[in-house]
Amino acid sequence: MKRRALAVLAGCVGVACLLSCQRVTPSPLPPSATAAPVATAAADAFVLSSSVFARGAAIPAAYTCDGADKSPPLSWTEPPAGTQSFALIVSDPDAPAGTWVHWVAYNIPAEVRSLPEGVVDDTGLSGGVHGKNSWGRFTYGGPCPPSGTHRYFFKLYALDTVLSIKKDDATQRRLLAAMQDHILAETELMGTCTRP
């Protein structure tokens, strides 16, 4: 009787051992479970560029205070759906006294996809409006670092509204405050300027 019980016990242990040693191959996950999340393309595809300088490259002298001091041509890709207007701010964060604002423009119509070279007044903004730069002027002022290399950030904002801000009040600070909660997407183009 004892021998029979031992034989049965040994048989059970053997079967258990065999089962535990078998390799279990997990069933593959469905493709939807392993695929990377898809990014929203609208904001990622919104890109600002210029035909006269590449991202991170030197801005040609013609667009600085050492040349004609004219604004560079700019163009951008399709903005997110629901865009009602664009705002543009160009600034130098490396200025000795703090950020120096070179260009402020807003209420650029939603259908516009570029600005020409040499914008001097609101006419060149295709219906947009110039704000006030750090010189107190309502126009573009080109890079003009006192010395060394400075960075110049051209920032374009796609807004879900047309801003009701008076031209005389449209400084960078007030424009940013007015844009709060209305920015659908933003893109920037950085160029440099070096002077001895």
Image (cartoon, helix red, strand yellow):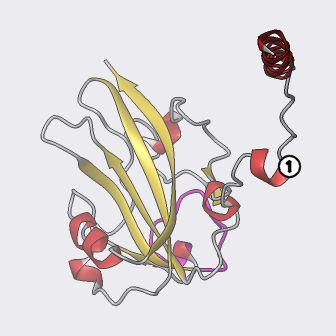
| Residue lying furthest bottom | 164
Residue positioned 85% across, 50% down in the render: 30
How many numbered marks, from 0 up? 1
Please provide the residue range marked out in magenta.
Answer: 110-124
Image quadrant in which you'd find residue 174: bottom left
Main SS, magenta region, reads loop
**Measuring 45% from the left and 39% from the top, which residue is drawn there?**
67
- Position of residue 118 measured from the top left corner of the image (x, y, whole percent): 54, 58
Q: Quadrant of the N terminus?
A: top right
| Residue sitting at x 66%, y 61% | 40
Residue furthest to the top in view is: 3
Which amino acid type corresponds to the residue marked 1 in the rendered image?
A: Pro
Quarter of the rendering containing residue 194: top left
Seen in the picture, residue 6 relative to 98 is either above or below; the reply is above
- Above or below 33: residue 180: below
Q: Residue 127 at x, y = what percent?
A: 53, 84
**From this viewpoint, which residue is outermost toward the left?**
97
The answer to whether 168 is drawn above or below residue 152 in the figure is: below
Label 1 sits on residue: 31
Task: Confirm whether the magenta stretch covers residue 17.
Answer: no
